[in-house]
Amino acid sequence: MSSYYISTRGQGPRLNFPDTTLAGLARDGGLYVPEIVPRLMQNDLAEIASMPYADAAFRVIEPFVGQDIPSADLKSIIQAAYKNFSHPDIAPLHKFEDNFYLMELFHGPTLAFKDVALQFLGHVFDYILTRKKQRVTIIGATSGDTGSAAIDSFKGKDNVDIFILHPHNRVSEVQRRQMTTVAAANVFNIAVEGSFDDCQDLVKAMFNDAKFRDDMALSAINSINWARILAQVVYYVVAAARLKKPVTFCVPTGNFGNIYAGHMARSIGAPIEKLIVATNRNDILHRFFETGEMRTDGVTPSLSPSMDIQISSNFERLLFELYERNGAAISSIMDEFRSKGSFHVRAETLIQLKNLFASGRLDDEQTLDVIRDTYKRRNYILDPHTAVGVGVAEAYRKNNPQSLVVSLATAHPAKFPAAVKKAIGIEPALPAPLADLYQRPEKYDVLPVDLAQVQQFVRDRAKR
Ligand SMILES: *Cc1c(COP(=O)(O)O)cnc(C)c1O
């Protein structure tokens, strides 16, 4: 049996898992969601609680994939995806105190939680493309973490060339070096003389150029890709199973991908109470959960750059569900959002949302305070993204002392040394496999914000 996916805008073709994975965005501009959401079985949670992570991942992922990838092959894909993690538990829980845990998601090769999804995606892509005898050109824009995680996952793969655009001089040095020191012949880094938004606009323009898209067989690996969400569902289920009690998760949020995965985990039957949206000063989501109005308001750079976001793309998936899977309604809401920069949800939808989610925000000063305070009180060094989550979680715990709260640690502190140093005067060291990062030779090209030049660069280098 196949598992099928449908578009949130109601028009895109229904696809099976492999085609959904390669498609990324649906042709009607929507995002793919499962046609039928599977449910965990009675004994699944108890068994998952004592399974190695990769086995638990197979248990969670398989019903979403169906027989388009035979079980034995899916098992090997998952094993391969998690073999390069430096911690045997992949997503270990660190206990702060009774009822308060941190889930460490940064033990992958590039030190951010993006690895959990992208290591899986790389192996899934490779498997699907090999079976279909296809070759694709992956193009993505990054503010830092996605690019490094994607490059690590796709480096050296025979059926993929990968081009990652980052804003020149606007990613951290660790982030840049993680991308530019990878020597594989299929990896191309483009430093764009502009902002992250310029990078994203260039990528969008390349996808909207039908001839270029077809000539290059373009493929997307950004956080709207369903297979990435799916890989992230796993750690929510595993944490809830291991803690054996209903859990509230606090999630440092940008594109709403990670927290949507938490919502999906709850939908399949994991015992999850609230999901808390934690934002930095770019608080469009926090304001939305207070008012029911999503309104863009520009982006100001913060200490947690991976959460500096105008529009949380994955939110559309949640909206589709809350609007009774009415693709036409979502399509018109999204049109309104694009033209006016804002939309409202129905009053009853806001009530539903408040039952499912809570939210909070932290500015940069508060973020530094949390890093300092956590170091002092708990002898634990947080990265600035994780600190936003911990700060929001602590506030939630004051009002909900009975709740069991797990806050997600989305990056290793060594990935953002400047912010950490600012808070506690200590520059966290890179873990051993990356210790010589500053000695490795870099390779990247600097290009202006010019679509024609970037397209020519890709045409000249992709092995089509
Ligand atoms: C990407 C990222 C986030 C935000 O995750 P979303 O899925 O976009 O909500 C938070 N923290 C870090 C370190 C990230 O790299």
Image (spheres, rainbow, N blue to C red):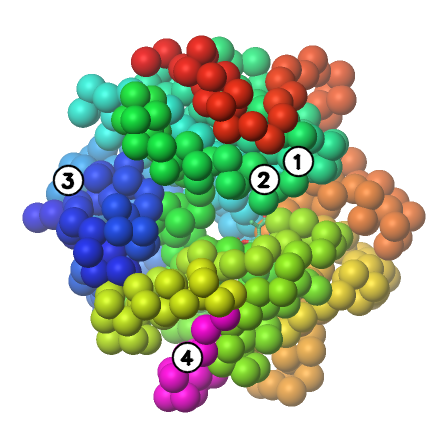
Q: Earlier in the sequence, mark 1 or mark 3?
A: 3
Query: Three-letter amino acid code at disc 1?
Result: Gly
Residue 68 got which mark? 3
Q: Percent from the top left, x then y, of residue 323?
A: 29, 75
Q: Nearer the viewer, mark 1 or mark 3?
A: 1
Q: Nearer the viewer, mark 2 or mark 4?
A: 2
Query: Three-letter amino acid code at disc 4?
Result: Val
Q: Nearer the viewer, residue 259 or 340?
A: 340
Q: Disc 4 marks which residue?
A: 345
Is residue 45 part of the magenta span, yes or no? no
The secondary structure type at the circle numbered 4 is loop
Query: Three-letter amino acid code at disc 2?
Result: Asp
Quarter-of-image position of residue 43? bottom left
Q: Disc 1 marks which residue?
A: 194
- Cβ atoms at labels 2 and 3 below 8 Å apart: no
Which residues are the magenta region? 342-357
Instruction: Answer left or right for 112 relative to 455.
Output: right
Q: CA distance from mark 1 to mark 4?
A: 34 Å
The secondary structure type at the circle numbered 2 is helix
Residue 198 got which mark? 2
Q: CA distance from mark 1 to mark 3?
A: 42 Å
Is residue 345 part of the magenta span, yes or no? yes
Q: Nearer the viewer, residue 25 or 394?
A: 25
Q: Residue 101, relative to residue 431: is it above or below?
A: below
Q: Nearer the viewer, mark 4 or mark 3?
A: 4
Q: Quadrant of the C terminus?
A: top left
Q: Nearer the viewer, mark 2 or mark 3?
A: 2
Q: Can residue 108 be seen from the camera position used here?
A: no
> Outermost residue toward the right?
425
Q: Residue at x 18, y 37 (%)?
A: 69
